[in-house]
Amino acid sequence: MGLVDLGAGLIRQLPAEAAHRATLKLLRAVNPLLLSAVPDDPRLHVNAFGLNFPNPVGLAAGFDKNAQVPDAMAKFGFGFVECGTVTPKPQAGNPRPRLFRLGRDGAVINRMGFNNDGSAVAARNLRARKRRGIVGINIGANKDSTGADRISDYAWCFAELAPLADYVTVNVSSPNTPGLRGLQNRDELTKLLGIMTNARAQLFDTTPQAHGMRKPILLKIAPDLDSHAMDEIADVVRASGIEGLIVSNTTIGRPPLRSRHADEAGGLSGKPLLEPSTRVLAEMHQRLNGAITLIGVGGVASGADAYAKIRAGASLVQLYTALAFHGPGLVTRIKRELVACLQRDGFSSLSEAVGKR
Ligand SMILES: Cc1cc2nc3c(=O)[nH]c(=O)nc-3n(C[C@H](O)[C@H](O)[C@H](O)COP(=O)(O)O)c2cc1C
């Protein structure tokens, strides 16, 4: 057992938010250059949004809100790391406790509320990076912004952070900022994505050289959508010129749960989210029919879970909650199991399996 695994084991004994803080501290202390990164099986390589992903397993947003440790996380074998959610101004988030482990359910409930140090700090951290792995930045609005200000928050973060990341995720699906998910409605979403693509044109379409640095825009949606809402999102996304869709954020639904904290308010993630988020992913794949690249998130804790998302239409997957239960060795296990799934079903690359139900 290495030092990091030992640290991860001890950290799992702490209350949830203290464990997270201790993990970040440990990771900041570890020189990412010293962590080993084993080259990925070529069958796992994915080309999406014009980026070459060494493998399809990404770290989901929320773990590294201030972009402090993307390089260390990449060294644990993630094919890409999404930092954030970042808002323009720093904000403390909701009062504690706001993060609950549901051990018997393999789940977490959180109502963090976009606690982060603001876009200037995230920008400074991204500028200080020593190594290049694929890093996305997930952006949102401050809690005290409403109406037009809320949309300006996204434009502000885009302008400040897009030049420093490989892709930008527009997060309209956190259940912990009141009213945020209303941005998934047709009119609001059309306006928001229009402003995002305009902001991108202003930044990157000025000269041929700048155009080469143009960043893909992804939208992250909730799993709590009926079929009308999914139709609307698919229409808007198709017309918008953005490149990707992340399905999904945490759920406000409460499937039957067995743990003590099951009734806490907030977004539920982990094992109970696997089935509903994969269902919405498959629905969006059907509606978008390959027009947009999909990333599947929600409850991934094994190669079989990741493979289910890929067969449902995801080109890439992300996870967060399972990391808290299984530790960083999970990433290597998922990749090994994914290769076994591909081999078993006669696919010579992961991309061949995308959407094959
Ligand atoms: C503690 C915690 C904080 C999160 N914070 C964010 C966030 O800031 N932005 C975001 O887009 N998603 C956030 N998420 C959602 C995750 O990125 C992911 O979409 C969700 O947890 C489902 O994946 P999982 O079941 O693998 O955790 C958070 C999740 C957790 C558990």
Image: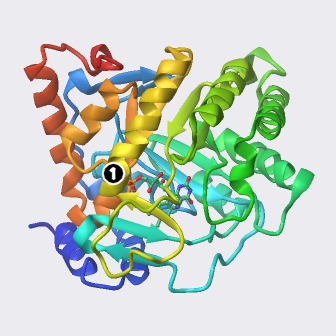
Horizontal relation, residue 337 to residue 195: left or right = left
Q: Secondary structure at mark 1?
A: loop
Q: Is residue 125 visible?
A: yes
Q: Residue at x 67, y 78 (%)?
A: 92
Horizontal relation, residue 208 to residue 347: left or right = right
In percent of width and height, residue 307 lies at: 25, 32
Horizontal relation, residue 334 to residue 253: left or right = left
Q: Residue at x 49, y 56 (%)?
A: 251
- The three-letter code of the residue at mark 1 reads Gly
Residue farthest to the right, as pictured: 148
In percent of width and height, residue 321 lies at: 35, 60
Rendered position, 42 above or below 19? above
Q: Residue at x 55, y 21 (%)?
A: 292
Q: Is mark 1 within 8 Å of ligand 1?
A: yes
Dot 1 corresponds to which residue? 299
In percent of width and height, residue 60 lies at: 45, 50
